[in-house]
Amino acid sequence: MSSAKPLRRIVIVGDGMRAAMAAAYLAKACGRAGADIVVMSGGEAGKTGQVVVRPSALRFNAELGLNPAELCKKNIASPLFAAEMPSSNGPVTLPYAASGVASNGVEFHHYWLRASQAGFDSALHEYSLPLTLQNARSGIALESAAGFKIPFGLRIDRASYAQLLVNVASAAGVRASKGKLSAVQKLTESDWPMRLSTSDVEVDADFLVDVSEGSSAENAVGASRSGWSGRYLRIDSGVDLPGIEVFRLQRGLTRFASLIPGRGNAHSDSGEFNRIFHAEENRITDMACLLTADEAEARQRPALARKIDLFTACGRIPSEDYEVFQPCEWLAALMARGHFPERAERLAERMPETELRIWLESLRRQIADLRKQVEAA
Amino acid sequence: MSEHTIKRVVIVGGGTAGWMAAAALSKFCARSEVEITLVESQAIGTVGVGEATIPSIGKFNDHLGIDEDTFVRETQATYKLGIEFVDWGVMGERYFHPFGTYGFDLEGIEFHHFWTRLKQQGDTRSLDAYSLNALAAYDGKFLRPEPEHGPIMKRLAYAFHFDASLYAAFLRRMSEQKGVTRIDGLVGEVERDSESGLIHALNLQDGKRIAGDLFIDCTGFRGVLIEGVYKAGYDDWSEWLPVNRAVAIACKRKGDPEPYTRSIARDAGWQWRIPLQHRTGNGFVYCDRFKDAEVAERELLESLEGEALNSPNHLRFMTGRRKQFWAGNCVAIGLSSGFLEPLESTSIHLIQSGISKLISLFPTKTDAPVERTEYNRLMSNDFENIRDFLILHYKATARDDSKFWNYVRTMAVPDSLMRKIDLLKSNGRFFKYDAELFDLTSWLAVAVGQGWAPEGYNPMANALSIENVTGSLSNMRSVLEKSAQAMPTHQAFIDRFCKAEPANWEQKKP
């Protein structure tokens, strides 16, 4: 069976954190099956500063043996309960967990909305545990945060994160080859399908993974878009929103590893990869568009227009296949951009109004008490 | 007509769909000051002939607060662990489509890649050896998983076989207790707003007028409102799913009821067998281009395991779905919304899915274009995802013994299905859409069972040594076998917890 013959060598083209992520993960995922991983690096410094890791990427780190508590202890990371996004109205904070608690299968914001429309004066953020933790003046230790059992991401120093990933990659046997990729040659009369060249070396490979910030391999291969084509996978950084760069790399790499091709034809695998990869790209662009574009531009995107319409009509946020952002993030973004539901979901009416007010008051008090405790700690 | 706030819901039709809708809406609208009226006529029979379900029915009943043992007793139900398919891939072979999952993943790699690896080394064990549901089903065992039974038993997923007419009657009692008004009558004229086209009221043939703000069409294939009034249109899928007739009959049961449905492929369709506590439901679904009704009836009668308990009931249908499930202020639920043959027991699931989506999107005003559009989109996805899975059963066959099988084996299939087949057949890859009902286990069961096992596997499954893989899979088999052996028999479980009163057949005969 051709597909069970594992890839012998994967060359990664890129620098800094991006190349380190790819090398560490692919070495872990494919190295066990015998693949040789080579990083072809142009030696560029890459970006510096801090990088946001969304909650969904923590599993990726865990698979590489990177524990968030240890990263925080080393002072190279801090927990993140919400991400601040740029928008046309100024920064918008999108929490990684919902406000309040759902009841009887109805999301909390419907109850809040119903009460607000009945004259109960409170802001949604007053019920938000993630925003309370995020806004704690002194910051909050990861150990304390973990006790609340809500999703959290990390803000990490990019260079330190890259170095940790390099350590993982090196320990897994990844080899580095200095030099900027100058040519990719398809081989027809060789045991190898391609040869990659820098000014100094030539490396034969079964597969090329391009995570460069520029387009060195893209030009060499002649591909025009991110995605998987033949023996070439390109993962670009995507839309410039906090957390998206790492998300795209993490999702792209893990999905590639789950579809990891053999040396045979992988046309159906690459087709599926691209379908999902581009669906996620669309969801990310929807969010960027909601945050920064005007209404007319937003309406050009059917899935986004549907979100706006349904949310405005009845407070629901329809889900598409391969969503990237959680409903609580969409909720915050939609409201920040001036979209408010005309009514709450009818199921929220099942709770008697007096009971609803007492419940909301109690929840609000609990969050306020918590805020005091966190700030006093 | 100005838009009204919805205060009156009128359900037309009182079969399984109608009473499921009434029970759910009366529960969820309890404090919303919404009046619910159900109009049905005893002059119109219901299609319900005994239903097999999938595990999601348990959630529906839970939401309604229905005690499971009471439900089983009241509906003469038995438990269902999956479906046995006989003669589908080739004549003389059978396979089991279980609920639940196969085996356990190893090192983050899905189980079936290791199974394929061993298979390529000559191992002949079927996937059934790694399914607790399949092992228990073929042993005639059942145990309702409880937390104290531990993590392995938690893997046992189950549904029910039940008498749909008894279920409707059970839900009717429940709904009427919650304030649903039932009116016996036949719909005559329908009053509509001349401008908006929204329905105002139904005039019954006996002269009663039933006014409403939202109308739920549960009138079965006829679609009295959705088609009769709104001309919603119909997408015909018979090019891919050509069966268009069925004949159903109940017979006396022989032996203890098996905890699974059986589906036996015939030369122009297939035959179901659904064991209930008091009888066995049987039916033959076929395509009238390849089989006469009389022949179908005769073949069905000849294959019964016991004495027939009623007269054969013949049905005609066209596989497909309404182009609009919600039009104006009318929502079609059940057979009025479309029809997919009961090959994977999805009829009740689609009712349930329609109801839960309607409740989530329940409108405030009579005209709710945004909610309507979203409901139609979601229901279209549901129907199409299930459609593709059903087509797989016909496409993945080596049978060439009849014109029917030659047609379905060689027909072109939708692109969405082709993509899935390519991925699964090449290297066992599977990606589930968010709203997709059937998961990897289901697709694997049918594809492998009908001779389309993955040709390759994820090369990362080679990371474990062959000894390690062999040992791990051996342990899995052993643990699952022991768990299945420890369960009581299906009949013993029913006898202990939920045995129904014997049925009175004199009352049930038409």
Image (spheres, helix red, strand yellow):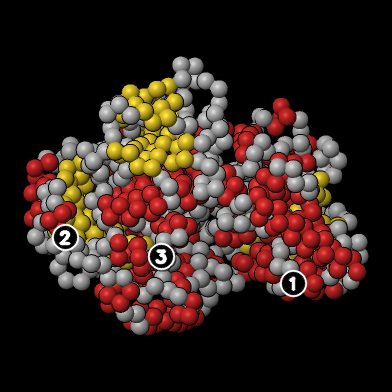
Q: Are the residues flagged by discs 1 and 3 from a single subunit?
A: no
- Residue B270 vs residue A233, the one in the foreground: B270
Question: The residue marked by circle 3 belongs to what chain?
Answer: B
Residue B187 x, y percent position in the rendering: 31, 30
Q: Amino acid at mark 3?
A: Asp
Q: Earlier in the sequence, mark 2 or mark 3?
A: 3
Q: Is residue B495 left or right of residue A205?
A: left
Q: Are the residues flagged by discs 2 and 3 from a single subunit?
A: yes
Question: The residue marked by circle 1 belongs to what chain?
Answer: A
User: Which residue is at 69% across, 57% downward?
Assistant: A359
Q: Helix or strand or loop: what does disc 2 sit on?
A: loop
C-alpha gap between disc 2 and disc 1: 59 Å
- Residue A245 vs residue B220, the one in the foreground: B220
Name the mark on residue B447: none
Q: Is residue A137 left or right of residue A297?
A: right
C-alpha gap between disc 1 and disc 3: 36 Å
Mark 2 or 1, which is nearer the eye? 2
User: Which residue is at 51% across, 49% downward?
Assistant: B30
Q: Amino acid at mark 2?
A: Asn
Residue identifier under label 1: A147
A346 to A309, vertically: above or below: below
Residue A202 x, y percent position in the rendering: 71, 57
User: Which residue is at 11% across, 49% downward?
Assistant: B311
User: Which residue is at 60% across, 44% downward?
Assistant: A345
Name the mark on residue B67: 3
Mark 1 or 3, which is nearer the eye? 3
Q: Are marks 2 and 3 in contact (CB under 8 Å)?
A: no
Q: Are the residues flagged by discs 2 and 1 from a single subunit?
A: no
Residue identifier under label 2: B504
Label 2 neighbourhood size at 10 Å, few (<14), some (14-19), many (20+)?
few
Res. B19 visible in picture: yes
The number of numbered badges drawn on the structure is 3
